[in-house]
């Protein structure tokens, strides 16, 4: 009877904890970022197929239009290059680029394709365009969630880096309980494990390298700035999870002051230590033993 009652109490307590965890929308951020990653992978794969497929008909277009989104729109606007309409292309590309595309279409080395084949190519371009629009919508959704659920982390790390950190660690609560040293290397697990195994090449930053304070700084400053940034992110996550008050302005000001101190203190790279090479020692030959005895 006691064991049954204890089990019921434990189950009830677990249900309460699950309901409290679901109330927070940080798990929505985690799932949205994971969906965003999968959608981007799909876009990359389908875009590569589109370039190969449409390149049979108009291979010069890829050399002129390098941006994937502009390329997809250009394919939809052009279709069959023999029926290219300049006014339609002007809706998606600038005038100078349109002139070059029109000229390239007139002397293209691509082959003519059947109307049915072109319809399938344009269908693929439409699917990619839909996925790109869907990706942009998910990105806006993540930014809105971050502004509501983690305003302090958003102010320090930015919505993209902040959402990526929450996803990598598994939620805002885990981020709030994580030390700054872990936050600093989140996303660099392979490099960290390699360092633990070999003792060489300790990672200085993980996904926070995407922050402009880190990747926009000289190499010899990045490790110190990444450490300062991770410290402020750890504090911001604790405030967001446990109190919810907005202290973003204070944290931002403190971070900017610390980054300024680092840049002023270390304006030049540290001097390299010269390695003095010792002259190679000649191997000593063992002394010959005297032969004793009668000759």
Image: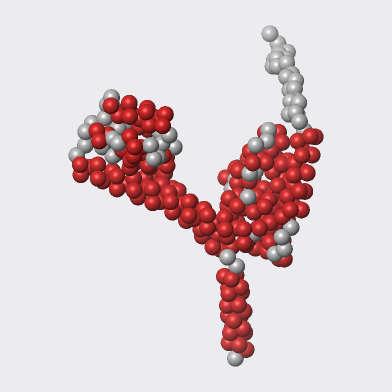
Location of residue 147 in the rendering, given as x and y in whole percent from the top left corner:
62, 58
Which quarter of the image is occupied by the C terminus? top right
Tell me the quarter of the image containing the N terminus: bottom right
Q: Is residue 291 above or below residue 232?
A: above
Q: Residue at x 51, y 60 (%)?
A: 31
The residue closer to the viewer here, 12 or 87, is 87
- Residue toward you, 101 or 210: 101
Look at the image and tell me whether residue 48 can be seen: no
Q: Residue 202: image x %, image y %?
A: 66, 40
Look at the picture and state if 288 lies above or below 234. above
Which residue is found at the position 66% from the left and 58% from the top?
151
User: On the rendered structure, is 251 left or right of 98?
Assistant: right
Camera-nearest residue between 116 and 96: 96
Tell me the residue at 30%/32% (across/down).
58
Q: Position of residue 155 (x, y in %)?
A: 67, 52
Taking 182 as reference, is 104 left or right? Answer: left
How far across and how far down the image is residue 127, in percent?
35, 50
Rendering quarter of residue 22? bottom right
Residue at 29% x, 48% y is 123
Q: Front-most of 93 and 35?
A: 93
**Looking at this rendering, what residue extends furthest in the top direction?**
295
Residue 135 as seen in the image, left or right of residue 148: left
Displayed quadrant of residue 171: bottom right
């Amino acid at each position: 009877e006691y064991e049954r009652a204890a089990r019921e109490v434990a189950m009830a307590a677990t249900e309460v904890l699950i309901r409290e965890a679901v109330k927070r929308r940080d798990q929505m951020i985690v799932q949205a970022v994971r969906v965003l990653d999968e959608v981007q992978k799909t876009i990359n794969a389908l875009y590569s197929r589109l370039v190969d497929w449409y390149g049979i008909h108009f291979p010069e277009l890829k050399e002129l239009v390098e941006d994937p989104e502009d390329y997809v729109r250009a394919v939809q606007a052009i279709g069959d290059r023999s029926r290219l309409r300049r006014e339609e292309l002007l809706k998606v590309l600038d005038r100078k680029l349109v002139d070059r595309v029109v000229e390239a279409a007139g002397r293209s080395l691509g082959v003519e394709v059947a109307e049915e084949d072109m319809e399938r190519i344009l269908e693929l371009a439409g699917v990619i365009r839909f996925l790109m629009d869907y990706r942009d919508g998910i990105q806006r959704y993540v930014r809105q969630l971050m502004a509501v659920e983690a305003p302090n982390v958003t102010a320090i790390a930015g919505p993209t880096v902040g959402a990526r950190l929450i996803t990598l660690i598994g939620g805002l609560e885990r981020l709030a309980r994580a030390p700054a040293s872990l936050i600093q290397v989140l996303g660099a697990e392979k490099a960290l494990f390699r360092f633990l195994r070999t003792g060489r090449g300790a990672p200085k930053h993980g996904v926070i390298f995407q922050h402009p304070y880190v990747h926009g700084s000289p190499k010899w400053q990045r490790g110190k700035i990444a450490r300062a940034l991770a410290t402020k992110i750890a504090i911001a996550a604790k405030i967001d999870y446990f109190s919810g008050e907005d202290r973003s302005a204070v944290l931002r000001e403190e971070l900017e002051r610390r980054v300024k101190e680092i840049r002023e203190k270390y304006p030049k790279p540290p001097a390299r230590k010269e390695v003095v090479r010792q002259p190679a020692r000649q191997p000593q030959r063992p002394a010959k033993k005297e032969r004793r005895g009668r000759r």
